Amino acid sequence: MQDMGEALTVAMTLVLSGDDDLIEIVALSLRVSLTATTAACVIGLPIGALVATNRFPGRGAVLVVMNALMGLPPVVVGLIVYLHLSRAGPLGFLGLLYTPTAMIIAQTILIAPIVAALSRQVIEDMHAEYADHFRSLCLSARQTVQALLWDARYALLTVALAGFGRAVAEVGAVMIVGGNIDHMTRVMTTAIALETSKGDLPLALGLGIVLMILALGVNALVHSLRLTAVRQAHA
Amino acid sequence: MREAIIHGPEALTAGAIPASNLLPLRVRGLCLTLGGRRILNGLDLDLGPTGCTVLLGPNGAGKTQFLRLLHGLLEPDAGEIDWNGTAPEQVTSRQALVFQKPVLLRRSVAANVDFVLRSRNLPRARRSALLDHVGLGDKARQPARLLSGGEAQRLALARALATEPEVLFLDEPTASLDPASVNRIEEIVLKAVRNGTRVILVTHDIGQARRLADEIVFLHGGRVAEQATADRFFAGPRTPAARAHVSGGLVL
């Protein structure tokens, strides 16, 4: 096994030279996690908005469930999706197991509750401020939700980025439903786990560096969005 | 119903709105309790079809909550609010309420007005006339939340007028504003009254009440303690509470 310094040097060379394998893995990771984030937003934002703007029996229980689902263990989500997509499962006929689509489904299930719960809080706070004005205008429920989603856009982008951060960094679910197949379902986290277990530290470290850069980039983007919101008095 | 869709700035100031058919208003036995405290206690009131009525009264008299009840934002515990026989579900959309602290959307000044116009299926072309009318024509592209207090309240007024309300409620619209801003807002209110919009305004500013009111309603103890034309009221309030209020005394 190479020592840490040598591994880091080789890792940096891989990153800077644009190694084909590395680029393929990073590209698939981004495709899977960005698609899952988009799908989670399509599902989670309206749910968050509807729960935020409506009072109904059992709402407290719904909030508890929504918050609890934020902590879903990725391996459990992976197992459930696996059971559904496996040949003997109810959705086995779709033939999705060990495909990027299965990974997208698993990550969507994992982060949709995060998007729903966090957006519910953001939108509920804003609705408390706008509610009288909207009632005065006699807005429909649909107009209310649309207006709140638009006005909370900066905060909701932060929510979406939090979901993306969770998706791109998780390993358990995509390992189970994707199978970590080379050139097909291998993403950064599963590759790091595999290469580390094989003792091939340079590629693992190279992927780790990219993952860290992505995490830093996401945080920088969130920070910049917050600054933009404050500048425009939208916060 | 009115058929007014106003397209030019002149239409906002030239008597384009015919007299309301939401009025006269008849309120009987209105009671409201909030947080265990009785706010309104069997309030009776009749309002005619035109002019500006100013609600006066000490803090806690229930003026703001009374406006919210009239606008349909609150449900009374008991009593009746009769807007000339209009079905309750049709009342709120024919009125507008400007809050003491204007609620501005996190958008530009123009987008704030556009939002209201779009919600009522009114032409967006009215926006510039409305903004010019309240003196914000040159600030259309600014973020609304960066406006000063007076500008924000004028934008709230523009949004309220955009809905072509038959009744315009104003809840202390000039509280904490400088004299110039107060003057500009009062001009807009007076134009709205001349236009035929029925204005019901809450204020603690006795001078403002003298300048704007055709009629004074003095609330005290959860009821109407006194109702009179502005001239008659300011010539000599008949109840001790109103006299103390107008003279700046402590009303208990």
Image (cartoon, rainbow, N blue to C red):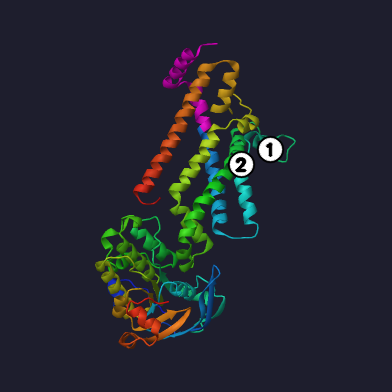
Along the line of sight, the residue nearer the viewer: B84 or B54 = B54
Q: Are marks 1 and 2 in contact (CB under 8 Å)?
A: yes
Q: Which residue is mark 1?
A: A80
The reply to whether residue B165 is visible in this rendering is no
Please identify the quadrant where the N terminus of chain A is shown: top right
Tell me which numbered mark, 1 or 2, is placed earlier along the sequence.
1
What chain is tagged by disc 1? A
Question: Residue at coordinates 52% horizontally, 71% vertically from top-left?
Answer: B74
Whether residue A219 is visible here, answered yes or no, is yes
Dividing the picture into quarters, in which one does residue B196 lie?
A: bottom left
Q: Amino acid at mark 1?
A: Ile
Mark 2, Cα crowd under 10 Å, few <14 / some 14-19 / many 20+, is many
Magenta-tinted stretch: A1-29
Query: Residue shown at 28%/71% (left/top)?
Result: B9
- Residue A109 is tagged as 2
The residue sitting at 54% across, 75% down in the picture is: B76
Q: Secondary structure at mark 2?
A: helix
Q: Please, what secondary structure does the residue beneath circle 1 have? A: helix
